Image: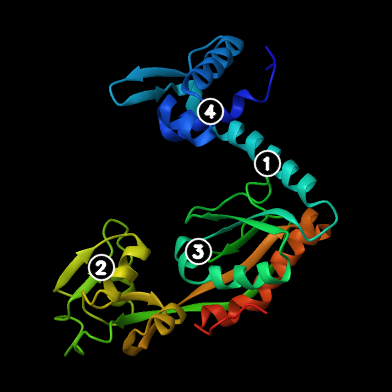
Amino acid sequence: MPLTSLDLIPAFCAVLEHGSLSGAARALGLSQPTVRRQIETLEAELGARLFTRAQNGLTATPLALRLREPAQAVLDQAHGLRRMVDRGAQVAGAVRLTCPRVMAVHVVPPLLAELRALHPGLVVELAATDSTEDLLHRAADVAIRVAPLTQKALVARTLPEVELGLFRAAGLAEPADLVSAPFIDDDRIGQIAPWLAARGLAAPRNVVLRTDDALVQIAAIAAGMGVGLCQAGIAARLGFVRVLREVTVQMPCAVAMHEDQRASPAVRALFDHLVAGLPGALKGRPTRPR
């Protein structure tokens, strides 16, 4: 049976994300009874239960989990249409940018400040996520990628590779060696130890913190907890000191957008600004609004 209204999709996706009617209502700016009615209407139209009650909120049924991806795709496309209408033919309206969380905090904001000074009518929706947002289904308009591009039908500009290295805070004493140095390691991902081993380095024995969150690792370095992995440009901006300068790793970096978006002035303005500004920003060079 066809759905009578696409207005039910945001409620479904919000309950999936937040796990409760109250959380979904807050996210959507609606009342809890309204969200409940929308979910009940959707279940009635589908003729199936989507959520069951649990002590900690609502639990998605197997059917709801299967519908998550197509429902989100419908929602993303609707948002994409809205942004296209908002932008019109001017460098104005909303443009959605996705990039890794570390870049969203430490690299991108000065570039967006520059862009805002050039185009006051442009609003950037920044999705800070380490997962890959789907450009083909309009989950984002522009993406900064630090992994090889796999999607087709994209316009992409390859940028200089991003350098990572080992750093410490200026107030932390220079360690005699890496094995005994206070070290900030990853937790369950388990990438840092193999990375060191591939470069002929023994695993650090004095681990003071384990976390898979790169933002937390950078904060721990800044707090003087120990030596940790960080992008070289971010380290330069934060005043970190390099440890074992010869030890480096390079990440690919690119800016991408869907090929259909090249005619949009607003999307193109963001894309071109990132292509021009990211190489310097990733090396820690200061940016100033023009």
Does 70 appear above or below 134? above
| Numbered circle sitting on residue 104 | 3
**Relative horizontal placement of residue 108, taking residue 91 as reference (left or right):** left
Q: Is residue 162 above or below residue 129?
A: below
| Numbered circle sitting on residue 30 | 4
- For label 2, count other residues whose C-alpha is less than 10 Å away and answer few (under 14), some (14-19) or many (20+): many
Q: How crowded is mark 1: few (under 14 residues within 10 Å), some or many (20 or more)?
A: some
Q: What is the secondary structure assignment of the residue under circle 2? A: strand
* Neighbours of disc 3 within 10 Å: few (<14), some (14-19), many (20+): some
Which circle, 1 or 2, is nearer the viewer?
A: 1
Sooner in the amino-acid sequence: mark 4 or mark 2: 4
Q: Out of 210 and 101, give the one closest to the viewer.
A: 101
- Compared to residue 261, the image places residue 113 above or below, namely below
The percent position of residue 287, horizontal first and vertical second, equals 58, 81
Query: Which amino acid is tagged 1?
Result: His
Three-letter amino acid code at the position of disc 3: Ala
